[in-house]
Image: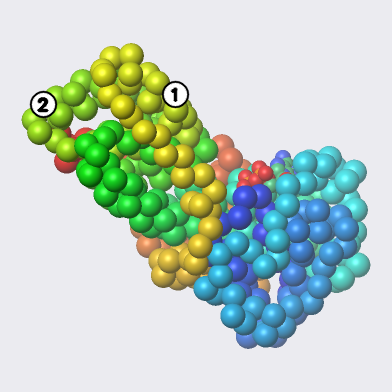
């Protein structure tokens, strides 16, 4: 393998730059040339493909977002459109492609490796949602978790000064991990996730009995995949007379400088992706499972539920918030 390319695709996440940096440096260290594809799959179609040098990734490890930019490119699902992207890779003599993104991005990579045998593809999980099979953690999850903790600690100051209930809505798409980990970390009274059914009446009763016990405030952590924060607050008022304030954290969760955990994860996964390409491997998503680097075939990532919701942590959070 003499030439590879790297792109970032789908929603951005903190640590994507650190992953790209690792791909670039690991490859150059091994005498492989690296090209950056700007704006995800859209850049493949537009031939927005440029050579990266060691210095191209200098001063990026600490930056959030992605300097390669990301873009949604729905037309890439169309085989005839994809051929144009594959032609552009061939034009540059690129034999391996590393895709940093979510499982939509992995599908694009899988299609490329199926449609041409001379371009190998490897996926790196980059999303704050922690919703990709084949890895315990995705790049960006830890940073987003810390952002949420920071925000909720501040919200708690107001909640306790005014003896209020706050409903905090966090991201995660259909995955409750951000809500669960953040909820446990901030000592939320209730955590609502899409993976577990919770009766809002029970939540209301818990808040009410807390108030009777002299509790000054409550935090209800809601995953966006479960319901919106506003819907949750509205439903609570059906059962109790509570002035619940809603805070939708929104895109603030996707930004910021990556945490140390995410920088290390991104560096390890970026380096490993290049190692796999050097071995001639293709069609794998890399990940970390039980602190070991792993490679899982794309098909398994799409078809199996290896990234399971951690019910032990969920049950513990419940036990600790009585
Ligand atoms: P994520 O990678 O975060 O899941 P998306 O689902 O938006 O984000 O996917 C990112 C991009 O990956 C899409 O804009 C599209 O270019 C490409 N993609 C998604 N699904 C497919 C598919 N089934 N086949 C080919 N390309 C796809």
Q: How many marks?
A: 2
| Residue 32 visible to the viewer | no
The reply to whether discs 2 and 1 touch (Cβ–Cβ < 8 Å) is no
Residue 45 image position (x, y, % from top left) = 86, 55
| Residue 14 visible to the viewer | yes
Compared with residue 224, is residue 284 higher up or lower down, i.e. above or below? below
Tell me the number on the disc at residue 212.
Answer: 2
Q: Residues within 10 Å of mark 2 (few under 14, many from 20)?
A: few
Q: Closer to the camera, 59 or 138?
A: 59
Residue tagged by mark 1?
A: 231
Residue 195 image position (x, y, % from top left) = 40, 30
Q: Judge from the rendering whether residue 114 lies leftward or rightward of residue 60; answer left or right.
A: right
- Residue at image coords 51%, 44%: 250
Q: Closer to the camera, 247 or 129?
A: 247
Q: Residue furthest front?
A: 162
Circle 1 SS class: helix
Q: Residue furthest top?
A: 238
User: From the viewer's perspective, is the residue at label 2 or at label 1 nearer?
Assistant: 2
Q: Closer to the camera, 289 or 260?
A: 260
- Residue at image coords 50%, 67%: 257
Circle 2 SS class: helix
Q: Point out the image quarter for the C terminus.
A: top left
Q: Judge from the rendering whether residue 81 lies leftward or rightward of residue 63; answer left or right.
A: right
């Amino acid at each position: 393998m003499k030439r590879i390319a790297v792109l970032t695709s789908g929603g951005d996440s903190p640590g994507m730059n650190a992953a790209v940096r690792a791909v670039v440096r690991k490859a150059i260290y091994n005498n492989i040339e690296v090209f950056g594809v700007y704006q995800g799959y859209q850049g493949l179609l537009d031939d927005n493909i440029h050579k990266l040098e060691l210095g191209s990734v200098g001063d990026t490890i600490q930056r959030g977002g992605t300097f390669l930019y990301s873009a949604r490119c729905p037309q890439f699902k169309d085989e005839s459109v994809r051929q144009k992207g594959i032609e552009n890779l061939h034009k540059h003599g690129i034999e391996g492609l590393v895709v940093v993104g979510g499982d939509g991005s992995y599908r694009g990579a899988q299609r490329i490796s199926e449609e041409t045998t001379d371009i190998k593809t490897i996926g790196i999980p980059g999303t704050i949602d922690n919703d990709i099979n084949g890895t315990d953690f995705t790049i960006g999850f830890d940073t987003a978790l810390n952002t949420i903790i920071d925000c909720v600690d501040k919200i708690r100051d107001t909640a306790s000064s005014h003896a209020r209930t706050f409903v905090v809505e966090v991201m995660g798409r259909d995955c409750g991990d951000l809500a669960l980990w953040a909820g446990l970390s901030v000592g939320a009274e209730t955590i609502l996730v899409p993976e577990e059914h919770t009766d809002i009446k029970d939540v209301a009763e818990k808040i009410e009995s807390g108030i009777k016990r002299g509790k000054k405030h409550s935090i209800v952590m809601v995953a966006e995949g479960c319901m919106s924060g506003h819907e949750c607050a509205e439903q609570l008022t059906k059962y109790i007379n509570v002035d619940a304030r809603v805070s939708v954290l929104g895109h603030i969760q996707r930004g910021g400088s990556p945490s140390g955990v995410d920088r290390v994860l991104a560096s390890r996964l970026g380096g490993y992706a290049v190692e796999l390409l050097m071995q001639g491997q293709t069609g794998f998503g890399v990940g970390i499972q039980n602190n070991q680097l792993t490679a899982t075939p794309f098909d398994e990532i799409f078809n199996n539920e290896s990234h399971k919701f951690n019910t032990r942590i969920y049950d513990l959070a419940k036990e600790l918030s009585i």
